[in-house]
Amino acid sequence: MPSRILTGVVVSAPLALLLLASCNAPLSQEPEVRLALINGNIVTVDSLLPYAEALAVAGDTILAVGSTADIVALSGPNTRIIDLEGKLAIPGFIEGHGHYMGLGEAKRILDLTQVKSWEEIVAMVEEAAAGVDPGTWITGRGWHQEKWDSVPEGSVEGVPTHHELSAASPDNPVLLGHASGHAAFANAAAMHAAGVSPETPSPSGGEIIRDARGELTGLFRETAEDLVAAALAKSRDRMTDAERDAEAREQARLAAEECLENGITSFHDAGVSFATVRFYEQLANEGALPVRLYVMIRANAEDLAENLADHRMVGYGNNHLSVRSVKRSIDGALGSHGAWLLAPYRDKPESVGLQTVDSDEVTRTADISLAHGFQVSIHAIGDAANREVLDIFERAYGQAGKGANLRWRIEHAQHLSGADISRFGSLGVIASMQGVHATSDGPWVYKRLGAERAEEGAYVWQKLWQSGAVVTNGTDAPVEDVDPIASYFSTVTRLLADSTTFFEDQRLTRQQALESYTINNAYAAFEEDLKGSLTMGKLADIVVLSQDILSIPAEEIRETEVLYTIVGGDVRYEKGE
């Protein structure tokens, strides 16, 4: 990891006391230690003091890091002391790319992430339809045709037609999102509600999938999803403002609960509306954001130009809400054949995928963001998409001038041309990646790209790291489970379900992987002076794990549990409580 981001000073407890005394503060005014972790294996992710036994928290920050004896000496009658008994304590995990409200919403709809067949999905929908009034929409998310045991008979492009789903739910519209978030499946009632017919043209940046006769299959790829999603949104018009607010609060509550149970103390929310930003601001004002949010605004260039300046926030709500990034997408996902490639798909030779947003629109977004001091974060998965974004970024960096601290990001950066890998490091573009995607997608990457292209640029973590790029980690939840341990395991093993390894040389070391989930994500949010390492003066965001993921046998990593999640010195989650 480039040393430039390992900032801050970690000191021992005696030196901390000396620093306090140097401020001429009477002993009676010394900060009160309200939390102490002792007898631990503390990995700080700070090169100045990589390891320690204990730390003390005063207010919401780390007062001292040192030996157990030092920290006990600082403690008082009101100090909560947690004996770690040798357990591993590390900086709180920072989810580097996820969808916070989507994570909460995923807990309220049909969970299709574990289904093994189309028949199972049809049965789930039929059961759901039996329990609701006619006309009520049934929604779900998480299906992926490549994870099914078999290809259903009569499938088009590996995906079944809508007829069984329509028969199972004739009176209820159904919309089921693909695991990638870049395709959706609708039944006949949903397509009727949306006014979609076989004659409806595919929108720019999307595809309405039809069979050989030109009939609708029910699959909508990329921007075509919006046709049916708009009908779903219209059906919600009859909800009252109070009902909408209650629903949003429930989503936020469920998302926070899921994050804290998994040791996540900060979350990079990769693309929300201006309205959602205002909702987050309201929660922050109420002290109702237990997880710190770094938010990317998703809007078109016209809306950004009109509203961006009014929505910038840095460290709002006692460092619980920052809004200083803009998110756009330039292509889709590999699994749904939506990733924009330089050469055709191996298993769909008539297609190079989809450019979902025009390059001029992305360029305008970059210019507006630059003018308002916002970071730019662009979803790019295919090698053509990544090259186009790098070109746009390179022009913008030149416009900003040498020394500009932009820290622009490419979200996912999954499939690269070998010629573009070094550009991440030379330009200073952050590769915002998700370790678990590599092992989740690995089984079908060869099918989509072929072995040569896969080896050249598929999930090339170590190549990017060696280029000097800052590489970050996350899960893209709810696309994948938000569990950082699972993504960490994928990052350091690249082990597929069939026990083969997906390009072993691209694994990160365990220390690199830990940095990708802590200090690197802090850097990617301009927050490395506040979080990402257990350093005196930084926020006391800490996770305690049941096992030492840096040293135990690799096969045991996935069994690791979160024992404590601490945000700003407050124990927000404690296993068994």
Image (cartoon, rainbow, N blue to C red):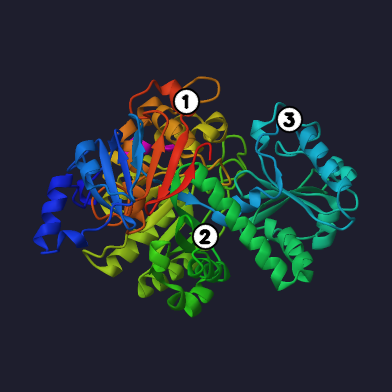
Label 2 packing within 10 angstroms: few (<14), some (14-19), many (20+): many
Q: Which residue is mark 3?
A: 151
Q: Which residue is mark 1?
A: 495
Q: Is residue 412 visible?
A: no
Question: In this view of the protein, which residue sits in the foreground, 107 or 124?
Answer: 107
Mark 1, secondary structure of its residue: loop
Label 2 is placed on what type of residue?
A: Gly
Which residue is found at the position 57% from the left and 52% from the top? Answer: 255
Give the mark nearer the N terminus: 2 vs 3: 3
Which residue is found at the position 47% from the left and 65% from the top? Answer: 362
Quadrant where the N terminus lies?
top left
Q: Which residue is mark 2?
A: 271
Label 1 is placed on what type of residue?
A: Leu
Residue 242 coordinates in the image, percent (x, y): 70, 70
Label 3 is placed on what type of residue?
A: Val
The answer to whether the residue labelled 2 contacts the one labelled 3, judged by CB atoms less than 8 Å apart, is no
Of labels 2 and 3, the one closer to you: 2
Which residue is found at the position 25% from the left and 49% from the top? Answer: 535
Residue 252 coordinates in the image, percent (x, y): 58, 57
Question: In this view of the protein, which residue sits in the foreground, 130 or 492?
Answer: 130
Mark 2, secondary structure of its residue: strand
Give the mark nearer the N terminus: 1 vs 3: 3
Relative to 454, is 519 on the left or the right?
Answer: left
Start-end of magenta stretch = 457-463
Question: In this view of the protein, which residue sits in the foreground, 577 or 518?
Answer: 577
